Amino acid sequence: MGCEAALRPQVIERVTAQASARVAVLDADAAVAFGLGEPVRPPARFAPCVYRTNWRPRWGVPRRISSHWTSKPTLPETSRPVSAALDARSEFEATLRALTRVAFDGDLQVYVPERGKGGHPEGEVDLALWEIHKSMVEEAQQSRARFLATMAELAARLLDVLRIGS
Amino acid sequence: MTGSTFTFSGFETPESDDPLGIWDLAISELEVAPATAYNAVEQAAQKQAAQKRERGLVWRVDHPESSLAAHTELLEQRAKVDRWEADLEAAARRLGGLSPRLSYAASSSDPEQALWAEVAALQSPVLSYGLDNTAHRVYEEVFERASSLLVQFKRLVYHFARIETTSGGTSIALTTVNWTGDYETAWLDGATTLEMTLHLEAVRLALASRHALLRLISVVTSGAMTLTAKASVPGGQVLLIPAVYNYVRSILREFEQWPAGAS
């Protein structure tokens, strides 16, 4: 029963999803901690889409099968100042449009971007944004793999020094 | 070419140029802000505040306009990074093949000669034990050069990336990537598909450049350690870093003159 239940798509209440997204937004403060969320010249009309992929290990979180929300609400209606994570000087509101979260153990959560309200029917996926988001996630995965490989290569090279003459 | 400009700030090299030959190195705006404090305490506080505000490594691509030509230019720059990495691999092999036994008899090229001259100088007991004032000064100078390179290497490893794209003077997007692998991108409201693609390519180019520079660090630091063990240079793990760095860069410049794939 356990396996079957795990494979069944999860039904998650909107309130839970919103709370989850807020956690992701708060996590963005890590960018500041790493010196990435520091001031920059304020962009003129920066706004509204924020994507993020989250690779931070989350120990102790129960295993989940990937969940997709393609029907309403595709994404919690989270709006926040981007300044906290991206730009401490600018005061512009941004709306979270797409989000992919990959946990350390391989769990994947994907929020699909819905089209904006400007004349477009709600519930329709914003394909242009979605394609770019997928490419960005792919880049994130490759970049991380390359970075780890480089660090491993450095360690291997340094260890090789010990073998000189043997 | 569209005349796009590629700027990288937060990183310096002794030659004040980008080893990849793509980015214009710029000193961070916040670091060059004029000091207004008049006493040491205020200056220290200002320095601390500046460090807190430091933006880390920032890659910035400015396009005169969003166009397919701008996209092509980004792809060409990425191909250049790929070629540079292949050359770096060849340089690493050449560095790994160096042997002190052959150094005096068979140093066929200038980079090798310069490297062995530096190794020989550091092997000298007069220099390594600082037996006279001139030797002491030379030793300090070498140590200073090694330290400043290590500081830059550390910055490159410690900070991750922030990538900004503008078109026609308007910011299109801003992406921050941190150590945990989190990406965040903010888009200009109403950014077109082409503008999004340009930013995505800029992100790819910046991260490929960062990766290439990390590999340069890997080759230089491990090369210094290997050479230290081979040539018995006291303190060479640190002191040989500038010499090995110069050697690798000379080799890469040499390879640039060759046709692609010939290295």
Image (cartoon, rainbow, N blue to C red):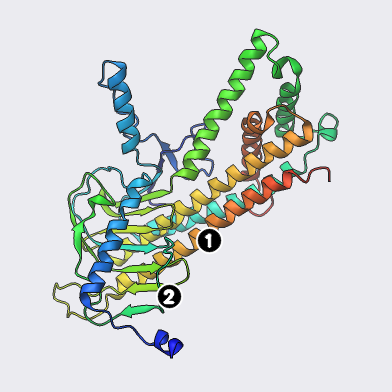
Label 2, label 1: how many angstroms apart (C-alpha)?
Answer: 23 Å
Q: Quadrant of residue A101?
A: bottom left
Name the residue tied to disc 1.
A145
**Residue shown at the point (33%, 72%) measured from the top left:** A130
Vertically, is B111 above or below B78?
above
Q: Write down the chain letter for disc 2.
A: A
**Residue shown at the point (52%, 51%) measured from the top left:** B211
Question: Could you tell me residue B62's position as x and y percent?
Answer: 34, 48
Q: Write down the chain letter for disc 1.
A: A
Position of residue A77 in the picture relative to residue B226 (left or right): left
Question: Could you tell me residue B231's position as x and y percent?
Answer: 78, 32
Give A162 or A74, whichever is nearer the viewer. Answer: A162
Q: Amino acid at mark 2?
A: Arg
User: Is disc 2 in contact with disc 1, using a CB cutoff of under 8 Å?
Assistant: no
Tag of residue B220: none
- Of callouts 2 and 1, which one flags the residue occurring earlier in the amino acid sequence? 2
Vertically, is A123 above or below A18?
below
**Can the viewer see residue B164 in this picture?**
no
**Residue shown at the point (40%, 78%) measured from the top left:** A66
* Label 2 element class: loop
Give B251 or A93, whichever is nearer the viewer. Answer: A93
**Residue shown at the point (35%, 51%) measured from the top left:** A30
Name the residue tied to disc 2.
A63
Q: Residues within 10 Å of mark 1 (few under 14, many from 20)?
A: few
Question: Could you tell me residue B216's position as x and y percent?
Answer: 59, 44
